[in-house]
Amino acid sequence: MTKTERRILVVDDEPVITLAVQRVCAEEGLRVDTAGSAAEGFALLEKRAYGLIISDIMMAGVDGFDLLLRVASQGIATPVVMVTGFSTVENAVRSMASGAVDFIPKPFTVEELIAVVRRGLRHGELMAKARAAERSHPARPVFTPCPRGCRRLGTMSWVRPDAEGTALAGLCDPFCKTVAGLRRLELAPAGGEVVQGGRFATVVAVDSLAHGAMAPVSGRILEVNARAEARPALVEEDPYGQGWLYRVLPSEPGRELERLISCSSGL
């Protein structure tokens, strides 16, 4: 991401967090407006457009989930990243299912914040291109559609169950594109466990930033895709096919799949 001046809205009732985000983003050439409550955030959203919204979940009165839903209901296209000091699987999964592009627990490192901010801004740029493409004839899709039969955790990761009770899982195309160049994949070993909403994989980009992705389901890893691990570009080229990451044995497929988004609806 070039250091162009783009504006971010940070909604958090902890001044130490808003100050930290301001300092880090200033180094990235970004302007940051802050709000100490969701109500203040709504007021700022009525005045100007933002490239990214970073919102705390636990705030007095209207919480971050209410803000996220209001952004969606008003048709505001700005990507939202949810942050919280109460990091739970439920909060992570609910955030992504409600339309957030990412979820980051407190405390976070400078590198984690930069990675999330760059990816969030890139997501907004690509979605704007996708909307423009939809208005053109013939439209050329910006993102590879997630195929029917898959279910996804937001626009981050996907899972596709099979008749044998196992499932393939991988990274969604929007996540891959917002990373802007996969250099290396750091995957869990076969025999390991993944937890829905927990760390699924780490993608190291060409700019050396590490981007963490959350798991779409919980379960035991039966197989790791060695081809994708050896050639990460395969994940970018064919994310829902040859670029899958794991074959897993889901531990709670019924309940956890219900939390995910059906890929029949698009992305």
Image (cartoon, rainbow, N blue to C red):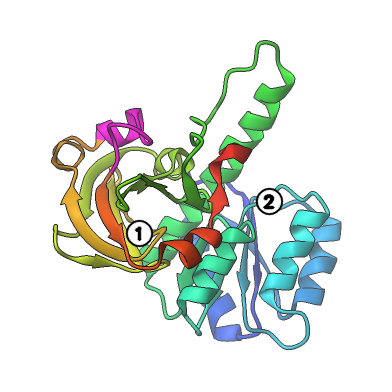
Mark toward the viewer: 2 or 1: 1
Q: How crowded is mark 2: few (under 14 residues within 10 Å), some or many (20 or more)?
A: many
Residue 38 visible to an observer of this rendering:
yes
Q: Residue 195 carries which label?
A: none
Residue at the far front: name it.
Answer: 163
Part of the protein shown in magenta: 233-244
Q: Return the x and y of residue 211 as percentages of the image width and height.
A: 35, 55
Residue at the disc numbered 1: 212
Query: Which residue is located at x 18 percent, y 65 percent?
Result: 192
Query: Which residue is located at x 52 percent, y 75 percent?
Result: 90
In the picture, measured across the screen, residue 208 lies left or right of residue 104, that is left
Residue at the disc numbered 2: 78
Q: Are marks 2 and 1 in contact (CB under 8 Å)?
A: no
Q: How crowded is mark 1: few (under 14 residues within 10 Å), some or many (20 or more)?
A: many
Q: Earlier in the sequence, mark 2 or mark 1?
A: 2
Residue 23 visible to an observer of this rendering:
no
Query: Considering depth in this image, is 20 or 222 the residue closer to the camera?
Result: 222
Q: Distance between the residues labelled 2 and 1?
A: 21 Å
Query: Which residue is located at x 57 percent, y 52 percent?
Result: 261
Q: Return the x and y of residue 253 as percentages of the image width and height.
A: 41, 62
- The quadrant of the picture occupied by the N terminus is top left
